[in-house]
Amino acid sequence: MKRFLPAGQFLSVVAALLLAAVSVRAHPAAEEMAAAANKLLASLDAAQKAKAQFDFKADDRLDWHYIPKDRKGLTLREMSAEQRQLVHALLRTGYSDHGYAKATNVISLEPVLQELEGTGRRFPRDAGLYHVFIFGTPEAKGTWGWRFEGHHLSANFTIIKGEYFGSTPSFFGSNPAEIRQGPRKGLRALAGEEDRARELIKSLDAEQRKAAIFDATAPKEIFTEAKRQVQPLENAGITAAKLSAAQRGLLVKLIEEYVRRVRPELASDDLKKINQAGVEKIQFAWAGGIEKGEGHYYRVQGPTFLLEYDNTQNNNNHVHAVWRDFANDFGEDLLRKHYAEHAH
């Protein structure tokens, strides 16, 4: 004789099973990143793998930069065409379409810059000199990280327990900011970072603009450069609380231009964090000219994050643009919480 559970008990059992299924499932981003990283690692020979993979707690994980320099890691130049495709597949797991397009455009500027500058440099402008780093063992429910980095690009992703993510420092640069001759004339790899900010500064009235512009001359570089950890910069500029609703909308679109570099669900989590800290507390500060072609700098600083942008080098045609998280660069805030809750 068949026995059936009472309806209430049956539903409780089903709910428990569903909860268990959810609890053991890693975040889709973690699953995709681990699968892509492992597929890449499996394609490497022993010498390549020794260059590409590091201990998760190695100091190299925090040693980032955006200039041409000697780096560890495995370069695209040292890979086969198939392996390079696997690197791009890994990039796709971290970036949105918006971010991936920016990244590939940045890389594509290297031969343009090589033609403009000529030979004889210690570090040639070479689209093959971008490096891959895997930190730890990629596991869907594990704690590990990866970086893709070279001239004017540094993508840093940290995964904690397959559930939580750090996706900063996030650096994009562009030289030239606008290609002014040749078959790709008019290309601007980071057009949004410039245009959205200029739209905002030009929307301000005279009194607002006086508060927002803290210096008539733009600095030659972003203040935070490639520091491993950053603190809030001095208060400057105008707060979102003193902007109109339309101007706050422009400010939010500017922030999204940076944050939505990463895949949508990770970007949504970061934007939620920014909103919870208080949009009205965010400061927008500008230095330099406000017309296109003039040297300029801006920053957007909130309680939890900083965006910095500078375009002054190479006759105001060379952009540096970075997104930093004061507590969670390299996933450090989430890692501290993780280690506090679990013995290691």
Image (cartoon, helix red, strand yellow):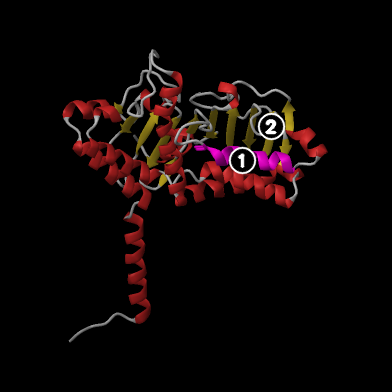
Residue 190 in magenta stretch: yes
Choose mark 2 or mark 1, whichever is in front: 1
Instruction: From the top left corner, tell me how far across and down residue 120 is, in percent.
Output: 38, 12
Q: Main secondary structure of the magenta part?
A: helix
Identify which residue is drawn at 70% across, 45% down. 280
Q: Are marks 2 and 1 in contact (CB under 8 Å)?
A: no
Q: Can residue 238 be seen in the rendering of this structure?
A: yes
Q: Quadrant of the N terminus?
A: bottom left
* Depth order, front residue of 278/194: 194
- Residue 274 marker: none
Which amino acid type is shown beneath numbered disc 2?
Answer: Trp
Instruction: From the top left corner, tell me how far across and down residue 156 is, in percent.
Output: 42, 35
Residue at the disc numbered 2: 286
Residue at the disc numbered 1: 195
* Depth order, front residue of 269/261: 261
Residue 99 in magenta stretch: no
Query: In the picture shown, does residue 184 fall above or below 268?
Result: above
Disc 1, SS: helix
The answer to which image quadrant residue 62 occupies is: top left
* Depth order, front residue of 220/224: 220
Read off the magenta span: 186-203
Q: Is residue 75 left or right of residue 275?
A: left
Q: Is residue 328 left or right of residue 134?
A: right
Instruction: From the top left corner, tell me how far across and down residue 9 is, in percent.
Output: 35, 76
Which amino acid type is shown beneath numbered disc 1?
Answer: Asp
Instruction: From the top left corner, tell me how far across and down residue 103 is, in percent.
Output: 43, 38
Query: In the picture shown, does residue 329 fall above or below 192?
Result: above
The answer to which image quadrant residue 336 occupies is: top left
Disc 2 to disc 1, C-alpha distance: 14 Å
Identify which residue is drawn at 65% across, 34% down. 292
- Toward the right, the furthest residue is 207
